[in-house]
Amino acid sequence: MKKKFFSLLSIAVAGSLSIGSAAMAATVNGSGATFPQSFLASATTAFKTAVPAHTVNYANPGGGSGAGQSAFRNNTVDYAGTDSALTAATTPTFGWVYVPYVAGAIGIGYRLDELGGTTLSLSPQVINGIFGGTITKWNDPSIVNDLKSNPLWTNKKKKTDLKGATALIANASPGSATVTVSALPSLFRSVKGKTVEVVDAKTKKSLRKAAFSKAEVGLTFPAKAGVDYSVRLDGKEVAVFAETTVNMPDKDIVVVYRSDGSGTTNNFCNYIRNAANSDWVANNSFTSCIPGGSARVASFGGRFQGQSGSANVSNYVADTNGTIGYAETSFFTDPTRAAKGVKMATVRNAAGRYVAATAAAYNSFLGGATWDAATGFATFNFNQATNTTAYPIGAVTYFLAKTAKSENNAVVQQFAKWILEDFGPKNAEALGYVALDGKAKEIGLAQVAKINAQ
């Protein structure tokens, strides 16, 4: 599947781009954050097709933001990936810049077979309790109370009829819900312009429809209990949603966290710190973020499982019933993991609305960020009390790049600019990420101009 996906994507990019090459062919190497792994795997392949003279590599797995920061400081890579700010210990002695180039939501993925496909709704306080170790059972009253405050949805369809298409659902205003349908790039080319719709499965009445003009399309429709809603793309059924009630099982919660130095962890802990509990610390180590530190994590025994990299976190969740973890959403919507029963929770935002982890919802939250024009770094606003459409957990991911003039740095600059101007806007959404636009894109391009400039 991946080979076919890369081939189709590369052909599309090659047909739409004309990029000049640096004077000599070059191979540049990078490593670091695993948050953008899915995005960069596609981008590096497509760039090779668009600019055959140059090769841009990104280690798979990348090692995590902490490893990338260290490799960059030690000058063993041409560029690195990070989702978190450098510290005094990881700041290079040579000239360098942050380059923001793409963003994405951090999903809270879980596998709980006893729920039969139900989408959980979690408040910041419950997220704090689960990942802080004070909520230990799936039937904890705090979780049950969250579920009572927000109508629950289950997907009765075990497997989509359209490979590469996924659907998420969340309640909108009272009496309505929003379904968001997404398509991977390999599928999007064949369904672009086709009809996506929500249909009353019993009466066959179409409740909402639209042209599938981009890789993620949301449809808000009137919803009520007792009705099955069929979600279709190009006439094929992607999901069947129905309001439901559940009895939470008396089962231990197994928390899966990043054991390596991780910018995803940094951003996830920063969210909990700002939204629920100021005792959390925002840094790259989960066992340092959590109140009580590594000793507290050790006291939980097998209920807390550390895994290195986003792929291993999401694989552990997919393979193990009763687990919950955090990773960029594309790792949980991956068809293989989703087929094993992985779901992502809707999260209550500062406006009191439970929102699904979609690209559009995180982009809404990102609109409230403040950007530092000097460094290129973003600071999030977790108090968007009137923004009902915001999904509040995610990250901007950055390249660490060098300002000195060299053939390799010229290619890094070319690659970063191409992502911001071309590849990201065309492909980020389909890959489960958020392309930077507006002020964020302007900041990113200004940082790109500093690469290879001295």
Image (cartoon, rainbow, N blue to C red):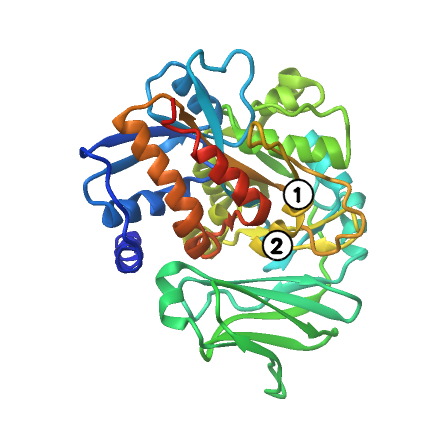
Going by the image, does 331 lie left or right of 386?
left
Residue at the disc numbered 1: 251
Closer-to-camera residue (23/297): 23
Does the residue at mark 2 contact the one at mark 1 (Cβ under 8 Å)?
A: yes
Q: Is residue 134 visible in the rendered structure shown here?
A: no
Q: Position of residue 65 (x, y in %)?
A: 48, 27
Q: Quadrant of residue 371?
A: top right
Q: CA distance from mark 2 to mark 1?
A: 10 Å
Q: Quadrant of residue 408?
A: top left
The residue located at (73%, 70%) in the rendering is: 176
The residue located at (69%, 44%) in the rendering is: 368
Q: Position of residue 283 (x, y in %)?
A: 61, 23
- The crowd level at tag 1 (other Cα within 10 Å; few <14, some 14-19, many 20+) is some
Q: Amino acid at mark 2?
A: Glu
Closer-to-camera residue (123/281): 281
The mark nearer the N terminus, 2 or 1, is 2
Closer-to-camera residue (222/84): 84
Q: Position of residue 263 (x, y in %)?
A: 54, 30
Q: Is residue 422 visible in the rendered structure shown here?
A: yes
| Quarter of the image with the N terminus in it | bottom left
Q: Position of residue 233 (x, y in %)?
A: 48, 74
| Quarter of the image with the C terminus in it | top left
The residue located at (63%, 88%) in the rendering is: 203
Q: Is residue 414 above or below residue 215?
A: above
Q: Is residue 307 above or below residue 91?
A: below
What kind of element bears circle 2?
Answer: helix
Going by the image, does 373 lie left or right of 72?
right
Closer-to-camera residue (66/50): 50
Numbered circle sitting on residue 114: 2
